[in-house]
Amino acid sequence: MAIRKIATIGHPVLRRVARDVPREELTSEAMQRFIDDLVETMRDANGAGLAAPQVYESVRIAAIEINKNPRYPYKPNYPLTVLVNPVVTPTTEETFMNYEGCLSVPNLRGEVRRFAGVRVRAWDRTGNDVDFEVKGLTAGTFQHELDHLDGKVFLDRVEDTRTLATWADFERFHMATFVERAKALVAKHGA
Ligand code: NI
């Protein structure tokens, strides 16, 4: 396994629509090694998730894992999940404002509107179908990661650029208010 370099905003790979991965390619040794690298890189960088384009591979694969995340201490834990060729659809019209950051957008956070629930259909890393729903902050994390596969970053969805903040200023001026909102969301959705 190896820790990969993370692409940052401005690199064209982050703006490309990533390609589907056929099953034969997914089960190849090279692709399985790549998925190990993706997970290792996510953990090394303390990401709540990481999408393949963020490590310069324009394929529809993303990993998500939240385990007492120091970048997002208010996020409920979520077990390691690798998604291949995922399709995400809202299960509700309810939305919430999520304060997001991204390993590919260093030292910036901003408020983004996300659906409060989504259905996720994908393959797991072995090519088996998975179909499940996620809610609340967790649903926000999934929408953020899957946006990367379509060449989108959270900045594209920031409705009010006055919410943009460095990480230090987020903690100083915005975190307390957001954490109150996040707690209410978690209480409502259990996630
Ligand atoms: Ni991101």
Image: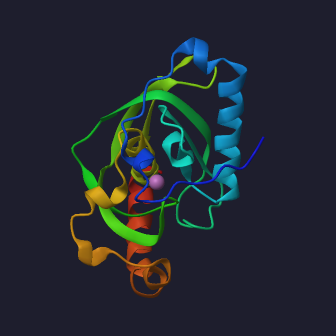
Q: Is residue 6 visible?
A: yes
What scheme was used to colour the molecule?
Answer: rainbow
User: For residue 2, what is the image quadrant?
Assistant: top right
Determine whether 68 is above or below 37 in the image: below
In the rendered image, which quarter is residue 181 located in? bottom left
Judge whether 94 appears above or below 126 on screen. below
Percent from the top left, x then y, of residue 138? 46, 49
Q: Quadrant of the N terminus?
A: top right
Please, which residue is most extreme toward the top here? 24
* Residue 101, image x, y percentages: 45, 64
Q: What x and y, as percent, mark residue 73?
A: 57, 67
Q: Is residue 191 above or below residue 166?
A: above
Residue 106 location (% of width, % of height) = 49, 68
| Residue ranking furthest to the right | 1
User: Which residue: 60% across, 20% down?
Assistant: 26
- In the foreground, 188 or 12: 12
The residue at 39%/73% (across/down) is 178
The answer to whether residue 127 is visible is no
Q: Residue at x 56, y 14 (%)?
A: 23
Q: Nearer the viewer, residue 155 or 74?
A: 155
Residue 153 sits above or below residue 1 on the image = below
**Residue 133 shown left or right of residue 76 in the figure:** left
- Name, please, the residue furthest toward the bottom: 172
All told, the count of numbered labels is: 0
Q: Quadrant of residue 124?
A: top right
